[in-house]
Image (cartoon, grey):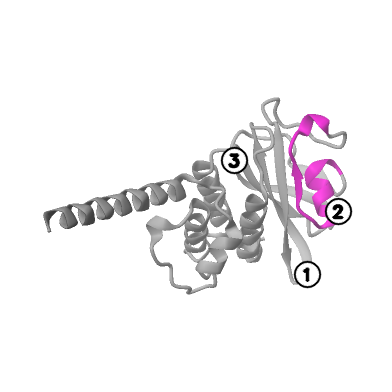
């Protein structure tokens, strides 16, 4: 009888250890499949967020961004808050900023709120650089190694890669989310899905 009880205790301890290890890995792993997360937890407004400790960092950030978007801050304050949240919590996001489409010209991007070192590229024509190409072609661009790009606007020698995600409102492009990284090839499909979701959420702010 004592042997059975001890075996039960061992099994219980092993289960607890495995569960704790799994939770720790999920907590620090920003690359957990975003689609898998979407199957388990709804991201719709007002959706119930359960077991926060078990959710990957991207999902936790989505919830925080929803809070920022629904806060009483002005539009630029909200966008600035999103930039800061992303830069502070995702290690390979070294520069995070939004560009708006110039409503008077329609084919030029104007720098909006950002987090990171100042950039000289405050205006970018459609088609020029990664941001300009993403705006012109209306699609997400991921550049794993910027040194191999011929149509690229350099902001810093430290930048190794970049992802640019267009923001759409009523079918029209109204801005972009631009992220630079000091690491080669850090952006994955999970980053793309995560950032495209964010751009949907902030579209009313641009």
Q: Who comes first in sequence, dot 2 or dot 1?
A: 2
The local secondary structure at tag 3 comes to loop
Badge 2 is on which residue?
A: 136
Q: Between residue 88 and residue 191, name the one nearer to us.
A: 191
In the rendered image, the residue lying farthest to the top is 157
Q: Nearer the viewer, mark 3 or mark 1?
A: 3
Q: What is the crowding at mark 3: few (fewer than 14 residues within 10 Å), some, or many (at least 20)?
A: many
Badge 3 is on which residue?
A: 93
Q: Which residues are magenta?
A: 128-148
Instruction: State the CA–CA distance, disc 2 to disc 1.
Output: 14 Å
Residue 76: % across, % down: 58, 54
Q: Who comes first in sequence, dot 2 or dot 3?
A: 3
Q: Who comes first in sequence, dot 3 or dot 1?
A: 3
Residue 25: % across, % down: 44, 46
The local secondary structure at tag 1 comes to loop
Q: What is the crowding at mark 1: few (fewer than 14 residues within 10 Å), some, or many (at least 20)?
A: few
- Kindly identify the residue that appears in the image at 49 percent across and 44 percent down: 89
Q: What is the crowding at mark 2: few (fewer than 14 residues within 10 Å), some, or many (at least 20)?
A: some
Task: Examine the rendering and report whether any part of residue 78 can be seen.
Answer: yes
Indicate yes or no whether the magenta region holds residue 139. yes
Q: Quadrant of the N terminus?
A: bottom left
Placement of 91 over or under 132, stated as above or below = above
The local secondary structure at tag 2 comes to helix
Badge 1 is on which residue?
A: 171
- Circles 3 and 1 in contact, beta carbons < 8 Å: no
Task: From the viewer's perspective, tell me whether residue 70 is left or right of residue 51.
Answer: right
- Kindly identify the residue that appears in the image at 64 percent across and 32 percent down: 183
- Kindly identify the residue that appears in the image at 52 percent across and 70 percent down: 42
């Amino acid at each position: 009888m004592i042997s059975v009880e001890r075996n039960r205790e061992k099994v219980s301890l092993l289960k607890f250890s495995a569960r704790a290890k799994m939770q720790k890995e999920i907590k620090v792993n920003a690359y957990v499949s975003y689609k898998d997360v979407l199957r388990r937890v709804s991201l719709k407004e007002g959706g119930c967020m359960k077991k926060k400790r078990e959710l990957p960092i991207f999902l936790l950030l989505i919830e925080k961004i929803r809070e920022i978007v629904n806060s009483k801050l002005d539009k630029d304050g909200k966008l600035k808050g999103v930039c800061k949240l992303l830069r502070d919590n995702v290690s390979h996001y070294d520069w995070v900023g939004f560009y708006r489409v110039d409503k008077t010209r329609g084919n030029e991007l104007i720098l909006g709120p950002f987090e990171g070192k100042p950039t000289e590229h405050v205006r970018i024509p459609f088609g020029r650089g990664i941001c300009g190409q993403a705006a012109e072609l209306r699609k997400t661009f991921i550049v794993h190694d910027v040194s191999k790009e011929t149509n690229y606007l350099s902001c810093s020698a430290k930048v190794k890669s970049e992802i640019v995600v267009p923001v759409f409102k009523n079918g029209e492009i109204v801005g972009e989310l631009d992220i630079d990284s000091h690491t080669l090839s850090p952006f994955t499909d999970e980053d793309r899905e995560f950032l495209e979701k964010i751009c949907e959420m902030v579209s009313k702010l641009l």
